[in-house]
Image (cartoon, grey):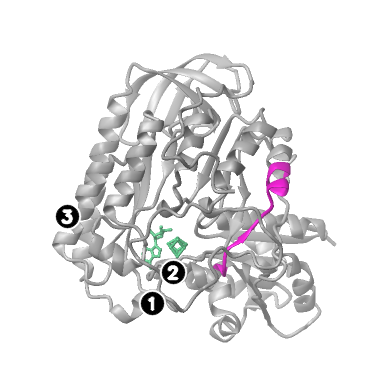
Amino acid sequence: MTKRYIVQTMGCQMNVHDSRRIEEVLRASGWQATDEATLADLVIFNTCSIREKAEHKLMSALGTVRPLKDARKDVVIAVAGCVAQQEGENLLKKARFVDVVLGPDNIPELPALVEHARSGGAPIARTVFDVHAPAFLDATPDPTRLEVNAFVTVMKGCDERCTYCVVPHTRGPERYRSADEIVREVGSMVDGGVREVTLLGQTVNSWFEPRGETQSSAEPSSEPPRWAGSVVETSQFAELLRRIAREVPALARLRYTSPHPRHLTDALIEAHAELGVLSDHLHLPVQSGSDRVLKRMLRRYTRGLYLERIAKLREAVPALTLSTDVIVGFPGETDEDFEETLSLVRAAGFTAAFAFKYSPRPFTPALKLGDDVPEAVKDERLQRLFAVVGEQQRAHLDGLVGSRQRVLVEGPSRDGVRFQGRTHRNEIVHIAGPEGVDLTGQLVDVTVEHANNHSLMGLAEGVVPAAPAPRRKRLPVLGGAAGGAA
Ligand code: 5AD
Ligand code: SF4
């Protein structure tokens, strides 16, 4: 009899990526997907714990499957992802009808754990980091659908200790994937029809070639790190980008997320100037514009360093657009601190931002700072921030009306009439094209006719034949750190 599963994914791109691996592992063990929870023999929640709200989402989602479990005792309920890692066995006590709790590094064990549950075994939690033998599950393109974009993991875990963040606890220390494996996976994605690859990692640009047993660049230390810091020149990420560009020339576009500002090395800036395949957009989380808050967040850079880095990047890539993450209402954040954030948002000219109200998380150092900014103040700051970013985004998009943009088409727009894609700088474009022609997966030259608040509308002028991305002129060495610190 066919065994059916359904996965519900919450949270970030890493979870989206992990859910794909979960599905691949299950399919290899004879499971089939269903969209209907009532038909499923296995329900998996791939969870997020970055903010309390995300965790609440799991609890209400679990509430909805409870009747399913009551009606059919043989249905297996599994919780994977960050809440699973954070809570472990505790979760089995909190939600007694959960059968399997699975950490992000234990995905390959899922089929065996599910069989254990199906044969009447006791509820079980497996949340062990693969620190001593890090493994990265190979991703394979889905042959049943044309995929334009794909994620490729280059590292996992985080050695930073941002005081608000639960990720070092839920994802463990940094572990890096070998360049050979990464390049092979990017190549197989492109062979399978993928045009754009996004390299993934919690601090993706701290990547370096793994050197065997001890991989972590900075073993968690009892010494408090120097907060203001400077750019860390040990990353080999720029070299990795060059190698991908060289060895997979058919790749149309390369992105990466999320970089940490202190790993935005001169070598990486130079790679941006040099590699035509690299997107002219960077999502570079800043979190706050106040040095006082950055220090308490232990971000290990100053406002000045952040602005200096992006100025250098813009010098190298004048067309660059930037987006960011901001937390408002971090403990002790004053009106003046928040004004500093607004002024940084203006100075940096972000054209998009994800902004969040501070949410106290378990196991994080900021817990002891309390949560003293009133909810109403957090709300107001969030609204003011969105207003500034919204204005900047609108002005930026308005400025593009009448221009010609090259768009990678991702699929039909929601209106079912147009196609939707993104420019090299990440602007979303809705395209009217010739009737009856599927533009999905094509690079299309588009004349921009109109700007909405968050996207552009344009007319397809012509399809660009698939060809290697042109190289930019090699720029002179910036700051004397050519080629990275390999
Ligand atoms: N509260 C609010 N936002 C948070 N983030 C991480 N931890 C917290 C927290 N405790 C935000 C940061 C990060 C993004 C993924 O989530 O802005 O960049
Ligand atoms: Fe969290 Fe900071 Fe690591 Fe990002 S760099 S995952 S915010 S601890």
Mark 2 C-beta closer than 8 Å to ligand 2:
yes
The amino acid type found where label 2 is placed reads Arg
Farthest residue, direction front: 480
Closer to the chain start, of discs 1 and 2, is: 2
Reading the image, the residue beneath label 1 is 365
Residue 351 quadrant: top left
Farthest residue, direction left: 336
Cα separation, mark 1 vs mark 3, equals 25 Å
Residue placed most toward the observer, 370 or 35: 370
Crowding near the residue tagged with mark 2, few <14, some 14–19, many ≥20 C-alpha atoms within 10 Å: many
The amino acid type found where label 1 is placed reads Pro
Residue at horizontal 56 percent and vertical 81 percent from the top: 91
Label 2: state its secondary structure: loop
Q: Nearer the viewer, mark 3 or mark 2?
A: 2
**Marks 1,2: beta carbons within 8 A:** yes
**Marks 3,2: beta carbons within 8 A:** no
Reading the image, the residue beneath label 2 is 161
Quadrant observed for ligand 1 in the rendered image: bottom left
Mark 1 C-beta closer than 8 Å to ligand 2:
no
Reading the image, the residue beneath label 3 is 339
Farthest residue, direction right: 1
Closer to the chain start, of discs 1 and 3, is: 3
**Residue 444 visible in the picture:** yes
Q: Which stretch is magenta?
A: 171-184
Q: Position of residue 254 (x, y in %)?
A: 56, 36
Crowding near the residue tagged with mark 3, few <14, some 14–19, many ≥20 C-alpha atoms within 10 Å: some
Cα separation, mark 1 vs mark 2, equals 8 Å
